[in-house]
Every structure is written in C-alpha cells, then in structure tokens.
Amino acid sequence: MLGATPAAAILDIYRGTWRSKAALRAIYGDYYRRMVKGLKAGPTLELGAGSGHLREHLSDVVLTDIQPASWLDATADAQMLPFKDACFESVLMLDVLHHIENPPRFFAEAARVLKPGGRVAMVEPAITPLSGFFYRYMHPEPVDMRADPFISPKADPNRSPYDANQAVPTLLFHRHRKRFERYFPDFRLREVRYLSLFAYPLSGGYRRWSLVPAFLVRPILLGEDALLKLLGPAMAFRLLVHLERR
C-alpha cells in the first residue's frame, strides 16, 4: 500500500501506473480537459502535478508538487508558494485540495499569486450517498464529515503530505457552500458540478486493476454527461470546481 511507501517514491509509482493503464489516462485526460476549459489564457500553475501530464493539454504551465521529481519544474507547498504576487492567470489542481492540511492558508496563497480575474480549477472527491460508501470502506484515505475546513488547524509536524480528508471539498463547496465566499472573499464560485458515475470507480483509479477497457471509457463518459443532472447528487464520485479571483 502507498501508506507504507516512502513519500519520495510515490510519484514514481504513480508515473508507472499512468503509463500502464490506458483507461486511467482516458479518464484523467477528460478531467484535465474540463478543468482547462474554465481557465484564462496565460501562465498557469499546477499544484500537486504528481506524475506530470498537464502539458499534454496546456503548454504555458509550471508543474509543481510537494515532492521533487525530474519531470517537474519546481517543488512547492500549496500553503507557502515560492512565487511572486500576481504572477499567474490560473491555478489548476487534481486531487490536491483534500490533502492540504490548512485550506484557508492555501486559498490565501492562491489569491496572492493570481492576477485579478484569475481562475482556480480543481477536480476532487465528491461525497454522495453511493460514493461515500465507496470512499469510506474501499479507499485508503479517510472521510471525516465533522471537520471544519474553514478554520486553520494547528500544524502537525508529523503529518505526511499524502495524509488526507476526502470530505473537505464536499464540505467547502456543497454542504457549507454559502459560507465559502464569506470566509474567502477573494474568490467567487463560478461553477461547482458533479462528475464521474461509472468509469472512474470501474477503472480502479491508480490501483493496478481496472474493470473497464480503455476503448469503452469515452462512450461511458458521454453517457454519464446525460445522466449527471439526475444521478449526480446520489452517486457522483467527483466534483469539478471553478473559482475566480475578485
């Protein structure tokens, strides 16, 4: 399991899985396209770039992760970004927010490095009745719906960068959505929508197994788009979020 793997080696494992799983590449490629569609043209910062594939969809991008890797442009903590003020048009992150220990500090840093009118795009876990069961009992990362992501916690010096609470995005953007712009007035919510009904859980994500062949991913995703409005609140596995810097 990844929990027993040294943090510095996890990006290499992810990169190897990405290369070996065509279904994974197809699903995450769809996530990237949806996020990029909501960005502004110009310099983009990717946080948690992991195995580093955004350049397949966007050229003007700085790839960063909290762990160093040869294919990344910089090592960066989302809570203390090593970039000057107002230097990016957009910030993009895929499965990153729910790993951040202090979300308020991240939103302050994102606002600082973005130009006015800049965008944040992210895809994160969605906790719905069906996906919540999956995430709680079939996924190694915890789900704590009692957490308060609007309050800065006391820093834990022993915390791993891969520690997580998969509930954080749902708490911020659904359960307590009305609080978001009150607590983070630098941003306004442009879009919050459900994604992923079948293809993502069937793919196994970054696990070695997959129950869906790559050639079926695109048709399944097209079918999901037609069903998301009806089924999303009950069973979606993902949230797509776009924010705008005021």
Image (cartoon, rainbow, N blue to C red):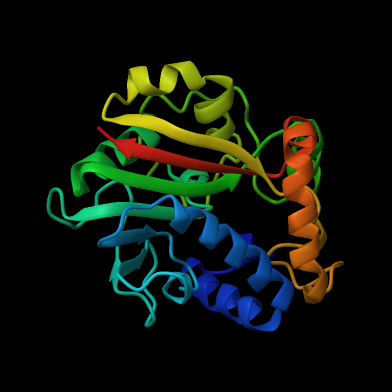
What residue appears at the point 73 percent right and 67 percent down from the top-left corner? Answer: 207
83 left or right of 143 in image: left
Residue 188: percent from left, percent from top: 36, 29
Residue 95: percent from left, percent from top: 53, 52
Which residue ends up furthest to the left in the rendered image? 84
What residue appears at the point 82 percent right and 69 percent down from the top-left corner? Answer: 216
The N terminus sits in image quarter: bottom right
What residue appears at the point 82 percent right and 59 percent down from the top-left corner? Answer: 202
Residue 54 can be seen in this image = yes
Q: Please tell me which residue lies in front, 34 or 9.
A: 34
Q: Please tell me which residue lies in front, 51 or 151.
A: 51
Q: Is residue 80 above or below residue 213?
A: above
Q: Is residue 42 above or below residue 245?
A: below
What residue appears at the point 47 percent right and 67 percent down from the top-left corner? Answer: 50
Instruction: Tell me where residue 61 sits by quadrant.
Output: bottom left
The C terminus sits in image quarter: top left
Instruction: Tell me where residue 5 sits by quadrant.
Output: bottom right
49 left or right of 80 in image: right
Q: Is residue 83 above or below residue 166?
A: below
Residue 169: percent from left, percent from top: 54, 36
Q: Please tell me which residue lies in front, 128 or 50.
A: 128
